[in-house]
Image: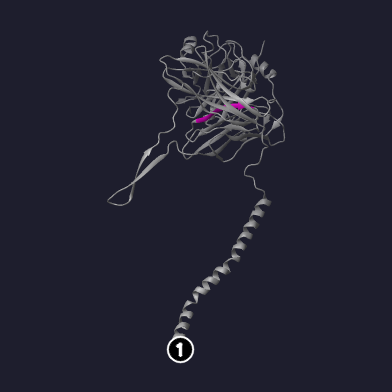
Amino acid sequence: MKIHFIFLTLLFLVAYNVQAITINEFMPDPDDGCGDCSEWIEITSYVNSFLENITVDTGEYPITLNGSIQANEFIIITKNSSAFSEIWNSEVTIFENKKMSIRNKGDNITIYNGSEILQKVEYKSSENNRSYGLCDSIFVPQNTSTPGFPNICDSKDTNETKENQTTTNNTCDLYVWIKCNETFGMGSNKYYPMVEDLEGGDFEPEVEYWIKDLFGNIVRSRFRTNNTNTAKSWTPPEITGTEAYVIHVVITNEVCNDTNLSNNAAEKLIIVKGDKPYSERECSCEPEIIEVEKSCSCKSIPEKEVSEKKEFEILSCPSEIEKDDEIEIKISMKNPSHDRKNYTVYSYVYEGNKPLSLGFDGNEWVNTWNANKQNVSISRNSSFTLTLINRIANDTEPGQYKLRVRIWLDDKKHDITRDILIKEPEELEPVNQTTEKENKTKYNESEGNESESKINIPTAQIVSKSEGNWFSTFIESIINFFKNLFNL
């Protein structure tokens, strides 16, 4: 029997609370005739649980659930609820996520409670029209798929999968933290998702990182990489005054037998300072005759806005980066027509006829023109904001190059090109670290400064003393006056 290995990580699976929610079965490659539009994930719970703040993520477009689930109840998450219902004829509760994608060649499916991982399933491949169900704590290929119902577990299949499943005996204690300044400015800012094995191992886990505002809105989309301990860049949105954001980093795969899962995720609060308000006020002053005072009247200067005629525009992208940085490009796309339009969008850095950037094609980073290609469908009279990510190829020399976003619509290409400077990476410098020796030096220096300031105090007192004897001088003047008067 051909067994496709399923690698499973169950994190914090504790009964009688929200962490009792679990993935029970999933089908990445259904034979549905609509391009896997009915692929599905089945969720169940061991106890009655609320679904608020529960997110199911397959890597690109997570879905946050709502409502509640009863003990041993099943719910389905699918791309197309109509196609799913037509195929399976099930009365199960369905959540539709039109943008979700479960890759046939392998993927991760993760359940979050907020930013905390409840469960993560990793599989390396899948068979057409075959689901994978949870049986005896591992996922095995199902001979009969049962969305909305308990899995049919064959003990023989379960035992064979257990015998063939790859595991690791390497122990570790992976620790995640975020290295960056606490204050960001406008333009490109750097931060470092750091992973360290506290037991001294040399493991390279995959991490996922993203940025949220304080209202829970994602402002820097989720991204996965095993390129940790290197600079990532983020350009904040243009703001007025200051705003707070939170950087999130979490380990998403199992590369060793981690003895402490509590430090596999990290958050860091940062403050973004805006350069200036969106609009400024221009005032003119005229004197009023009655009051003879100036009275000022103000008019607002219109905010700098994007022309409504522009269908495509780069909202933000760096003008210069270090070679190890990721390039994040945010694009605004508008469909002013009365029909839905389908677009293909990708970006690259180039010199002449050679691409110098890498893009993530869903499985790996590759050096091709359209590696980070995304297909976007925008409804009539609507707009959409898209984020593209590139990296610079290792053999690229520092210098000035071109960055291009290419958009295909109705077999016509639309290009937006910018200049970009590639620089050699700077060495990592510690942030906000002060040694005990430096603290003592600063303390001694402060004492010295205080001593110096004390030296000046007698001079001030001498002046006060001179001013304090004015009465004696006055009396002496009176006596001299009378002496002169009476010739004494």
Q: Amino acid at mark 1?
A: Lys
74 or 125: nearer the viewer: 125
Q: Which residue is mark 1?
A: 483
Residue 385 x, y percent position in the rendering: 49, 24
57 or 353: nearer the viewer: 353
- Which secondary structure is most common in the magenta stretch? strand
Magenta-span inclusion, residue 432: no
Part of the protein shown in magenta: 218-225
The residue at 67%/16% (across/down) is 160
The residue at 56%/38% (across/down) is 268
Residue 14 x, y percent position in the rendering: 57, 30
Question: Left or right: where does residue 377 sit relative to residue 420?
Answer: left
- The answer to whether residue 46 is seen in the rendering is no
Question: Left or right: where does residue 1 sit relative to residue 210?
Answer: right
195 or 6: nearer the viewer: 195
Query: Outermost residue toward the top?
Result: 33
